[in-house]
Image (cartoon, grey):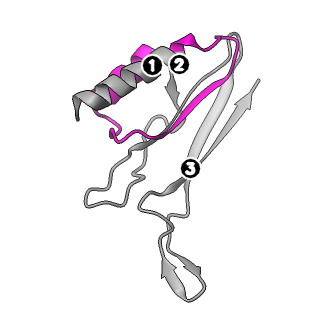
Amino acid sequence: MTRHQEDELAQLSRAARAVDPASMLVVTGDFNVPAGHEMLARFVEESGLLNAYAPVSPPTFRGPASLAIDHVLYRAPAERQVNASAELMLAEPVTIGARTGFASDHIAVCASFDVA
């Protein structure tokens, strides 16, 4: 991992902490940092976010190494409970017209949040 990635995650952590705690916060995307890496663990701890995939993030990248780099993280609104889940979508090849293949080198993610 690079210093640039560390700087970006530190900036994102500051932004996440600045969001009103009464608001639901969802941070998601291709972080290019695999689940289990110390840089991501530090970011999650510093930002106060939770992983919607918990306890295990599935691989989301179809590169030479199958990695979990697309993350769905969230923070519940203050004094509220959130039941979060995330699942993979379009993991199998799709046919569009005469072509069959994958829609992307990443596997699509669908997340649900039930706020009580």
The CA span between labels 3 and 2 is 23 Å
User: Are there few (<14), some (14-19), or many (20+) residues within 10 Å of tag 1?
Assistant: many
Does the image show residue 41? no
Residues under numbered marks 2 and 1 in contact, where contact means CB atoms less than 8 Å apart: yes
Please, is residue 1 above or below residue 14 in the view?
below
SS at mark 1?
helix
Residue, x 36% and y 61% (percent of image)? 62
- Name the amino acid type tagged 2: Ala
Q: Give residue 21's position: percent from left, percent from top.
A: 64, 11
- Name the amino acid type tagged 1: Ser
User: Residue 13: which disc?
Assistant: 1
- Comes first in the chain, label 3 or label 2: 2
Q: Give residue 79's position: percent from left, percent from top.
A: 70, 10
User: Is residue 11 left or right of 95 when viewed as pictured?
Assistant: left
Nearer to the camera, 38 or 7? 7
User: Is residue 94 left or right of 79 when viewed as pictured?
Assistant: left
Please, is residue 6 above or below residue 31 in the view?
above
Extreme residue in the bottom direction = 98
Does the image show residue 15? yes
Q: Mark 2 points at which residue?
A: 16
The CA span between labels 2 and 1 is 5 Å
Q: Name the residue under label 3.
A: 87
Bounds of the magenta segment: 17-46
Q: In which quarter of the image is the C terminus?
A: top right
Residue, x 30% and y 26% (percent of image)? 6
- Name the amino acid type tagged 3: Glu
